[in-house]
Image (spheres, helix red, strand yellow):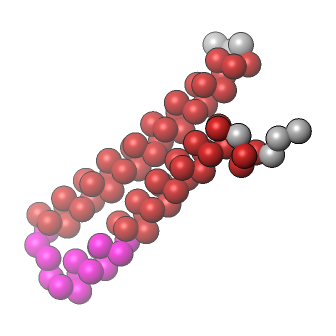
Amino acid sequence: MTQHGHTDQGKAGQRAALIIAGTGALWVLLGLIGEEYGWSNRVRLLIDLAALCGFGFGLWRIFRLWRQRQDEKGGT
């Protein structure tokens, strides 16, 4: 019997989790740095939009993984 983390799907799930966690960590870190150095609101908005794209990419990866599992089970 294979363990969850050692299958291709398990690794894909781990990568998606790392994308989301890394995006969140960088977003918080850059927000704190921007506040400390007094970056303009435009730069901070750009960081927020980049983080939104990172979170969206992570969710898209999770959705693809979920659809792949549904197809393998024969679901709709």
- The stretch of residues the image draws in magenta is 28-41
Secondary structure mainly formed by the magenta segment: helix
Q: Quadrant of residue 51?
A: bottom left
User: Where residue 55 sits: x, y (%)?
Assistant: 41, 50
Q: Quadrant of residue 68?
A: top right
Residue 6 vertical placement versus 20 (above, below): above
Location of the C terminus (image quadrant): top right
27 relative position to 25: left or right? left
The one nearer the camera, 28 or 9, is 9
User: Where residue 39 sits: x, y (%)?
Assistant: 14, 76
60 relative position to 29: left or right? right
The one nearer the camera, 51 or 16, is 16
Q: What is the count of numbered marks?
A: 0
User: Does the magenta run of residues contain 12?
Assistant: no
31 relative position to 68: left or right? left
The one nearer the camera, 73 or 76, is 73
Q: Residue at x 29, y 73 (%)?
A: 31
User: Does the magenta run of residues contain 34?
Assistant: yes
Q: Residue at x 64, y 17 (%)?
A: 71
Location of the N terminus (image quadrant): top right
Residue occupying the far bottom of the picture:
36
User: Where residue 52 sits: x, y (%)?
Assistant: 33, 51
Q: Residue at x 66, y 26 (%)?
A: 69
Residue occupying the far right of the picture:
1
Q: Residue at x 45, y 62 (%)?
A: 22
